[in-house]
Image (cartoon, rainbow, N blue to C red):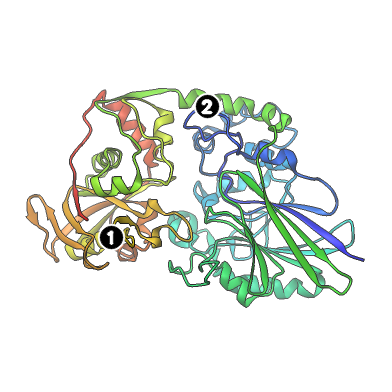
Amino acid sequence: MKRTLTIRFTSDTHGYLYPTIYADTQERPMGLMKLASAYPHDGNTLIIDGGDTIQGSPMTNLYHRLTPEERRSCLADDRYGVHPFAAMMNLAGYQFVTLGNHDFNNGLDALSDYLTNLDALCLCCNIRDRDGRLPIAPYAIHRLENGLRIGLVGACTHYVARWENPKTTAQLTIEDPVDALARSLDAIRDRCDVTVCIYHGGFECDLKTLAPLGGGTENQACRICRELDFDLVLTGHQHMSVPGVHLGNSYAVQPNYRAPHVCAVTVAVEEDGSKTFESRLIPAEGEPIPQAAALLAPLEARVQRWLDTPAGRLDRELPAGEHLDNAVNGSYLANFINTVQRSLSGAQVSTCALANEIKGMPKTVAIRDVVSSYVYSNTLVVLRMDGATLRRYIERTAAYFSHDAEGNLCVSGDFLRPKVQHYNYDYFSGIDYVIDTRRPVGSRVSSVRLDGHELEDDESVTVCVSSYRACGTGGYDMLVGLPVERDIQVDVADAIIEYIVSHPQIEVDTKRYGAVIV
């Protein structure tokens, strides 16, 4: 007799519980409370999340700023727990989750607060805290009502070790996920009818051609599917939609971020043990769960009041612009972010990146405009480097450009696949530089001038970068291991808000630092 496992899988919800992106108050088809309204709840369904749950939205941003006393007033009642994001997951009926890299952004105390309020079991076989206080298991075996035994193993990209605050990673043991997954799979394989890997990581190969995409070992889902024999691999981290694909020994899916849809997977198991897979993406089209909207109403009202708080005034608008046009002609928004970073850090040079989706800032700035224009949870690092290293840094950014078949300038496919990565193009302030896109990648930077003179290869310079970039992420390996002049543990969005508040009339830097020859 055929038996069936049904799964609802989300990942990278990033704290988007309400159907809004917070850049405005418009309701959109997204958000966990809208998405979860259609979840089935029965003995043969598992509801699973792939991590990056408690960081990434203005709601998470505000919540982590609140004092413990203020947090206690965030929920209408405590029927589903006292942590708002855990309470939402509990109300939605989640049974298993894994950790995402951004779940560590606010430290282990914040992660512990979330996990200890969560009804779901957290599975992660390759990351654990040294003190053993986090409620995390490497794997679990769950028996469905129809008798199927489901073995589940969780894992997270080991690049947490590169990206996170050293004070946090010092408290963790972090392994390569493939080796840890193999051990856990060996431990459960003979006791299960269906094996499921919940992996907060993505695909390192093009899913059509299987050609490697580069980028190191941040994403290893293809390798997991080829080398291990999980029946089902639930992936995340890349913020891309993969409704379903047979890959190697496994069937794999991935949902997009901010809960626009859920991956609905059905695994049918025949009497002989053979399996068939069906999957689809179900969009967030329902009404928000009424209990969730009521439960979180105090926190949401507080978020909206905070977002509408006036911050200050600029002498001109900072438009979002189009990414390619910004990269060629410069961005006033990037200039302003770099102004803030240079003011705070004292560095000679500052660099920043713009998110894939940004709001831009009007002349009269509210906090909503700031947190919708600088969406990352980054701090700042001042690195000391020589001129040769800075040139290599700019060369990596210059690889963003390519030309199409007609010779028109376009964005390189390396910055578009397997996911869009406009945020890996960096804008520099404090130097004048020339990028010639007609030259081969790696030899495009024809000039770098500092204080009016051509920068010598052995000349020392201080450069302020985000904590994300300082780890070498995005192909910037030349930054790894450089001397750290200052480690500024201030959230960049907070620094921007403070700068605007403390400078009543701001004249935006309109200089074009980079000249791009097309």
Say which residue appears at 39% left-offset and 36% top-offset: 494
Among all residues in the image, which is located at the extreme left? Answer: 453
Task: From the top left corner, tell me how far across and down residue 79 is, in percent.
Answer: 75, 33
In this orientation, which residue lies closer to the viewer: 116 or 292? 292
Q: Are marks 1 and 2 in contact (CB under 8 Å)?
A: no
Q: Secondary structure at mark 2?
A: loop
Question: At which x and y percent is residue 35?
Answer: 67, 40
In the rendered image, the vertical position of residue 1 relative to residue 57, given as above or below:
below
Could you tell me how far apart the alpha carbons at marks 1 and 2 are, in whole angstroms? 42 Å
Question: Does the rendering let one see residue 91?
Answer: no
Residue mark closest to the camera, 1 vs 2:
1
Q: Residue at x 57, y 39 (%)?
A: 16
Q: Quadrant of residue 248?
A: bottom right
- Tell me the kind of residue under disc 2: Thr
Type of amino acid under label 1: Gly
Q: According to the image, label 2 marks what residue?
A: 25
Location of residue 331 with respect to 8 vertically, above or below = above
What is the number of the mark on residue 177?
none
| Residue designated by label 1 | 407
Q: Nearer the viewer, residue 180 or 253?
A: 253
> Residue 350: where, in percent of width, then height?
25, 48
Residue 70 falls in which quadrant of the image? top right
- Residue depicted at 48% across the width and 69% down the height: 217
* Secondary structure beneath label 1: loop
- Left or right relative to 366: residue 53: right
